[in-house]
Image (cartoon, rainbow, N blue to C red):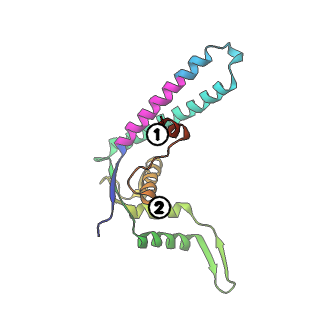
Amino acid sequence: MEYSKITVDVEEAVEEFKEELQSVNSERDDVLEQANEYEEPNVPRHLEDRWTDLESQRVQLERRISRFETFCDAVSTTEFVIQELTLGQVQAVKDIVSQESFDVDVQRQSVEGSPLQGVYQAEFLKRSVVQKPPEVNDVMDLPDTIGEWLWEKVDAFNTSGDEDMGNMSLTEAMNSEE
């Protein structure tokens, strides 16, 4: 039986981040324009708060773009193939997480510990990523920003499949009725 697979591309992610950055910069321009309508000490707090939030987003996006572009320059292909995990593979991941996370004392009938999220993500990634750039020996060797992005893709694919079901906002729902 063939299971579902998708290809995710780091270069495409860079383009998405650049589009997001353009949107953030456009919104920054709008906030600045609104703020310029006020005298210096009288700028409304909500504009200052929005500017701070947008500046944070801008910096994060610029850093992310830079790191992703550096990765793209270092590899011959920027694509990863992700496969849907079987029930047995998911259960194996859960077993490994339990083994790594909990201390079981059978005589006292006690269990101590808590699930280790890092172990879960690592094991899930190792099983889900079936094709990667040849320069990447192991998905655990990826830069953290790339690994986290890949984890988000793996988690979304294995949770909801390969179709983007979207998250419609209330405003979008209201506008779609017109």
Which structural element holds mark 2? Answer: helix
Name the residue located 33 percent from the left edge and 61 percent from the top edge. 4
Q: Nearer the viewer, residue 65 or 48?
A: 48
Mark 1 is on which residue type? Arg
Q: Between disc 1 and disc 2, whose residue precedes? A: 1
Can you see residue 131?
no
- Does residue 138 sit above or below 29 in this rendering? below
Q: Position of residue 22 (x, y in %)?
A: 45, 29
Which residue occupies 43% across, 37% down? 17
- The residue at the point 47 percent across, 69 percent down is 93
Q: Please rate how many residues cluster around mark 1, counting C-alpha atoms within 10 Å: few if below 14, some from 14 to 19, many from 20.
A: some
> Does 106 sit above or below residue 178?
below
Q: Position of residue 73 (x, y in %)?
A: 33, 41
Pointer 1 residue: 64
Q: Which residue is mark 2?
A: 122
- Residue 50 in the image: state x and y as whole percent: 61, 29
Where does the magenta region start and end? 11-28
